[in-house]
Amino acid sequence: MESTIVLILFGAFLVLLVLGAPITVALGVSALISFLYLGENPIKFVQIAFTSVGSFPLMALPAFILAGALMEAAGISRRLVHVAESFAGPFTGGISAATVFACLFFGAISGSGPATTAAVGMLMIPAMIDRGYNKGIASAITASSGSLGIIIPPSIPMVIFGISALGMQPPPEAVEKYGVFQSVSIPKLFIAGVLPGLLIAGSLLVMNYIICRRHGYRGSAEGFSGRNIACTLYKGFWALLAPLVILGGIYSGFFTPTEAAIVAIFYTLLIGFFVYRELSFKDLARSLETTTWLTGRVLLILFTATVFGRLLVENQIPAIIAEAMLSATDNIYIIWAMLIFFLLFVGMFMETLATILILTPVLLPIAYNLGIDPVHFGVVMVCALGIGFQTPPLGENLFIASGISNISIEEISVRALPFALINTIAIFLIAFFPDIVLWLPRAFGY
Amino acid sequence: MTVKFFHFIDNIESFICRSLLAIFVCLLFAQILSREIFGYSIAWSEELSTYMFVWFVYFGASYAARLSAHNRVTFQFKKLSKKAVNYIEGIADLFWIAFNVYFVYLSFNFVFFKMNLFWKSQTLGVPMKYIYVILPLAFTLMTIRIIQVNYLKLVKGIDIRDPDKQDVQKMMEEGGGASTQKS
């Protein structure tokens, strides 16, 4: 019984995917066939269509997308990059290190990896090439650090993970075995993402230093310019305030993530229209439009993925997979390695948000059954899928970096390999030492 | 005049969605202001904005279908010609249409024959029936959009591209210009 339903569900899903049907259709049709096969009432589809989307925390998604699009148009992102650039100074590999820092800053206001790569890359890749960097290396560094955008909060993938995880209770047998699990919430995920994000940034900086040393990229001759730093800090003051408003508001508990994003939107409108005067009504209309189709396409997947996930859970499929994994090995490190390689593999082929929506209902119950903390699991999942941005065939960051520098995707991918490698090592550290993720939320009293 | 009218019809979801988005963002902001400044919480604003959000999402999904923006896995098509890919995706879209038609039937039935007027929303007191109407409505629109896109692609031979890829394309042109200037 269970094996037939697995065959129907995953078989139909994969056939439709290979046929080139949209992901949401592959999910919906395979779930519908299974429903009809099981003789369940498909009216559930209608109810889930409404309840899965009609949740208040989910409104953080369009709000953050809109805020990010507006900040780009208002010139806030550009000023943040200039601040990071001014710190580059006389260090070996300084300007590329500044690229990593720029992504770190920008990641704190934008929730998307490709947006981070585009905003930072447009300014930093030409700057690096100016200083004699190999074009391929310059693009690879940008594409690799662009993934920081989805790990450093606020993070759109984490909002999506949080929403998928909210509706899933830990199975009772797991609670019996491992004790009570902590609950998942979006602010908690946002705090949990800080240290892992810094660790990954640190690993990128180390690799950057090694590569720049080998190629002999020295710092600028003019040295460390305090005047220049002060100047960009002054010009970027209002831009620097944006991440402070967003994150400060969320961490102090003053705002929910949705409200913080709403405040960020109005803050950007104010700065863009009256202080920097770079925003036009045309930009505003375009930002609204981008938000519309991006949200529509992601949340249609949310609807079908919810039905799909519910079928899986009702048929105990994650529990069966978890049992199979445990019978193969009960070493948690080997299990983590399997999970991470699986996520890296899937991340290479599928769009990140869709992947999270599909895999959370499958993998989170497995994680519960193995006694893995849900917040820890979510952060590792987002980090691992982030690497998918910098690997072919579906590396959005690579496409964007390649578009900016005019270097072939193949060459950038090769240059990006050392960064992907050290990122993977950092992810293993994050997976093996849960305290890297869990210590900060605990310290904040969540 | 007629051109303008058709342009409006062709982008109707976009107009609706942009208005809905702007309104619920303002509504949420008003709610934050009134709570933080006047210490008064507007009871109905959360519910109203959530329902507007649901309408926004499903009209947005239909608009994304018009833009052909729904994510597909395409790396297996790399060796095929653009035309062949269009036909394969057109066949795959038949499943989409079938799913939508069945879903419209289900939701239409549910909204008009199963839901009564006494099931009302908690704070607004509006019958839920009128809010659920979005489901048959948006999925009908989406089905029309899928047929329209496939007609444009297969019969008229118009190249409709995922807006993601258009963005990258645009950036390539701009970025290419920028880097040649610099170097």
Image (tube, rainbow, N blue to C red):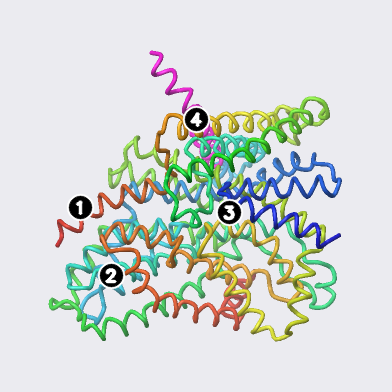
* Nearer to us in this view, A306 or A282: A306
Amino acid at circle 4: Tyr
* Nearer to us in this view, A2 or A318: A2
Most extreme residue toward the top is B1
Is the same chain shared between marks 3 and 1? no
Judged by its main secondary structure, the magenta piece is helix
* Nearer to us in this view, A249 or A173: A173
2 vs 4, front mark:
4
Q: Of callouts 1 and 4, which one flags the residue occurring earlier in the amino acid sequence?
A: 4
* Mark 1 touches mark 4? (CB < 8 Å): no
3 vs 1, front mark:
3
**Which mark, by number, is residue B151?**
4
2 vs 3, front mark:
3
Q: Which residues are magenta?
A: B1-30
Image location (x, y in percent) of residue A402: 31, 61
Image location (x, y in percent) of residue A71: 38, 50
Residue on which the image places disc 3: A18
Question: Label 1 to label 4, Cα distance in Å?
Answer: 36 Å
Q: Quadrant of residue A250?
A: bottom right
Residue on which the image places disc 2: A136
Residue A186 is left or right of residue B151, and the answer is right
Image location (x, y in percent) of residue A327: 78, 81
Name the chain under label 2. A
